[in-house]
Image (spheres, helix red, strand yellow):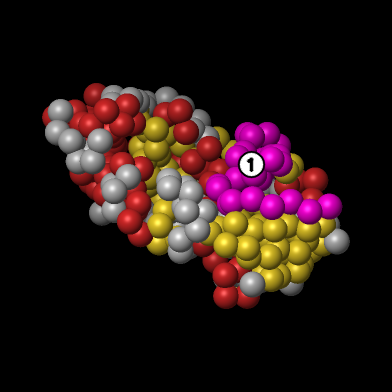
Amino acid sequence: MTYQGVLTKMRTEFKDPIQYYLVFENDFIHMNQLLTKTIQMEFVGYQCLNCSLNKPIYRQGFCKSCFFDVPQAADWIIKPELSKAHLDEEERDLEYEKRVQLQPHIVYLANSSNVKVGVTRKSQVPTRWIDQGAHEAIEIVEVPNRYLAGITEIALKDYVADKTNWRNMLKNDVKDEDLVVWRNRLKAHIPAEAQDYYIETNTETQLVFPVQHYPKKPKSLNIVKAASYTGTLVGLKGQYLIFEDETVFNVRSNEGLVVKLSLL
């Protein structure tokens, strides 16, 4: 059986274990069902997620010209503290920016390779934690806009990490932490503007990933350079496919690539 389409991040369902789906234009692939199956992946071309042209992907699934034009790739996406929609100030598209920025946002702690702080829209919980490969997570504050979430994250970065070590996450080289203790410890460092939004009583969310065995030395697959790769799928974690030979493939970081998948 063969599928072909443009890569976008896998859709997920919060179950035990997490359920993964790869969505192409004409196919909906339940990736959990492919565990233990041998898969051949071939690079076919590019398709920018905005203009749909066969142009090399620059970042985040967009060609270079679209990346510097579309609101989905503006600086405030990565740096929420730069959000300005609450001030009625436009960066690229004020209507889009208001729609995304002026909604409830969560500042959270997630433990994937280590405890880290992050920001996401409330509607993206727990999807964001799944995408990061976190095995446990907890909300710290729930604020009404992205800007407040951003300045809270910035304030907490001095006391907790803000990045995931993807290799350790994939090796499952992690330890359980008491995130309630972490949350309470960080309360004093939340900015005054966000103190009233602190979540006083909640518990950790636990996440279980469909991984049969973890790689000891994960090797990242560059499918454009390799052109073709064949391997047996043994796990799904974060947005990664994990193969038996310890090759790993980050679906999200390869958005906009057109690939052919064949089940052998």
Would residue 11 be found to the left or right of residue 111 on screen?
Answer: right
Residue at x 32% of width, y 27% of height: 99
> Toward the viewer: 69 or 187?
69
> Toward the viewer: 196 or 21?
21
**What kind of element bears circle 1?**
loop
Location of residue 114 in the rendering, given as x and y in whole percent from the top left corner: 47, 56
Answer whether residue 3 is magenta in the image. yes
In which quadrant of the rendered image does the C terminus lie?
bottom right
Residue at x 18% of width, y 36% of height: 90
Q: Is residue 250 visible?
A: no
Q: Residue 261 lies in what quarter of the image? A: bottom right
Answer whether residue 173 is magenta in the image. no
Label 1 sits on residue: 25
> Toward the viewer: 213 or 44?
44
Location of residue 206 in the rendering, given as x and y in whole percent from the top left corner: 59, 39
Location of residue 227 in the rendering, given as x and y in whole percent from the top left corner: 64, 72
Would residue 98 be found to the left or right of residue 241 on screen?
Answer: left
Amino acid marked by disc 1: Glu
Few, some or many C-alpha atoms within 10 Å of disc 1 (few <14, some 14-19, many ≥20)? few
- Residue 19's place in the image compared with 170, above or below, is above
Location of residue 130 in the rendering, given as x and y in whole percent from the top left corner: 56, 43
Q: Is residue 129 visible?
A: yes
Q: Which residue in the rendered view is the most extreme toward the front?
A: 53
- Which stretch is magenta? 1-28
> Toward the viewer: 155 or 54?
54
Q: Residue 136 lies in what quarter of the image? A: top right
- Residue 95's place in the image compared with 117, above or below, is above
Would residue 202 be found to the left or right of residue 151 on screen?
Answer: right
